[in-house]
Amino acid sequence: MTTESHTLSNGLRIVTENMPGLKSASVGIWINAGGRHERIEQNGIAHFLEHMAFKGTKRRNALQIAEAIEDVGGYINAYTSRETTAYYARVLENDVPLALDVISDIVLNSTFDPREMEVERGVILQEIGQVFDTPDDIVFDWLQEAAFPDQPVGRSILGSAERVGAFGRDDLATFVGERYGPGEMILSAAGAVDHDAIVRFAEKTFGHLPPRIGPVAQPARFVGGEWRETRALEQVHFTLGFEAPSYRDADFYTAQIHASALGGGMSSRLFQELRERRGLCYSIFAQSGAYDDTGLMTIYAGTSAEQIGSLAEVTMDEIVRAGRDLAPAEIARARAQMKAGLLMGLESPSARAERMARLVAIWGRVPDIDETIARIDNVTTGDVREFGARMGASGMAMALYGPADLAPDLDSLRGRLAA
């Protein structure tokens, strides 16, 4: 299997991969239009726009959009992240042209009917309320804001209820005009697809659009700080954040392997020490997320009010210890987990389409899988220890939600890291 790519004269990029033997395909449009591309008065509008794309176009109403894909047994959805909005569908081989037509229709021709806006505004306000009632969701938004305060990359993707309540049709149209140019779009498809046919479709459907690239996102700056929200919940939801490498950073895979060894599974340091040996929590994990120009290493655990102090302190001690003595066997296990996750994911056309779009956005190309595996294999035990020893060098962020009165403050935890 090999990827093929093409760029239209107006800047829209196309990447495909035919997967022999498959009878289905995943197709979608990934747009560099996420939360970090919003001005403060626009916060939440990328997500609002994603919802409104399904509420009617010049050719289809909301029901017809859903029926067009579901009548052939397919699936259509979308998501908004801090850097991307994606619209995608999974269909059988013969229905790829239909899926492309529906997705391009909702991207190019949404009408933003004011009546539908009011309906969807209510849906999004319910979604915001639901997040506030889901502690292990909202605490990550607060951690992000503590790590990157007063910056687009630190704000909630959903936005505030006040801003969502005030958006009008012109606000949506303005954001589309700023961010939905062809130079910000990647059409990606994997599975039972024909590259040449998709290029012809893209040329016919998008080729008339004038070249347009959106404004550059505000550079991210990790600051760190503490967010503590005390409430009478059953558990304290505890998160830590450290600056991590961007997608393009030479240490990207080092950070991924470190996070896996530290808290990526049942055999990881944090799981074994805090759950298995000490019984301080039920759930604990570490992960390293990346953006275009920075990243965030995150640790999460949930525990009782009485045990939050011990959990926080032992977590810091384990971070310090991992920077000193992670063993080659632990690094080898983390490498194996990372490679297996990557290769298993590639068995899905949906995962392949998303991966190709992400890599084209980062590198302008799709590196061969052997190149990626080699970069993972080239990370040494020394690299991971050295990375772990530097954690916190640029600061720390912490967010807590629940009965957190007994939790140590950020300065005391930072002191344990420096000890």
Image (cartoon, grey):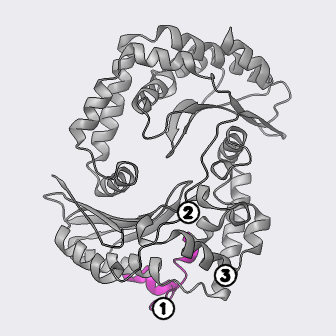
The percent position of residue 363, horizontal first and vertical second, equals 35, 48
User: Is residue 101 depicted above or below 412 in this figure?
Assistant: below
65 in the magenta segment: yes
Q: Which amino acid type is shown beneath numbered disc 2?
A: Pro
At x 51%, y 45%, the residue is 291
User: Is 390 placed left or right of 344 in the picture?
Assistant: right
Question: Of the residues under marks 2 and 3, which one precedes in the sequence?
Answer: 3
User: Is label 1 in a helix, a strand or a loop?
Assistant: loop
Count of numbered circles on the image? 3
Alpha carbon separation for disc pair 1 and 3: 17 Å
Other-residue count near label 1 (Cα within 10 Å), few / some / many at <14 / 14–19 / ≥20: few
Magenta region, residue range: 50-68
Residue under label 3? 170
Kindly report which numbered mark, 2 or 1, lies closer to the viewer in this rendering: 2
Q: Label 2 to label 3, Cα distance in Å? A: 19 Å
> Which callout, 2 or 3, points to the residue nearer the camera?
2
Foreground of the two, 415 or 97: 415
Q: Is residue 144 left or right of residue 228?
A: left
Residue picked out by circle 1 = 58
Near mark 2 (Cα within 10 A), the count class, few <14, some 14-19 or many ≥20, is few
Which quadrant of the figure has residue 231? top right
Residue occupied by mark 2: 215
Considering the numbered disc 2 on the image, is that residue within a helix, a strand or a loop? Answer: loop
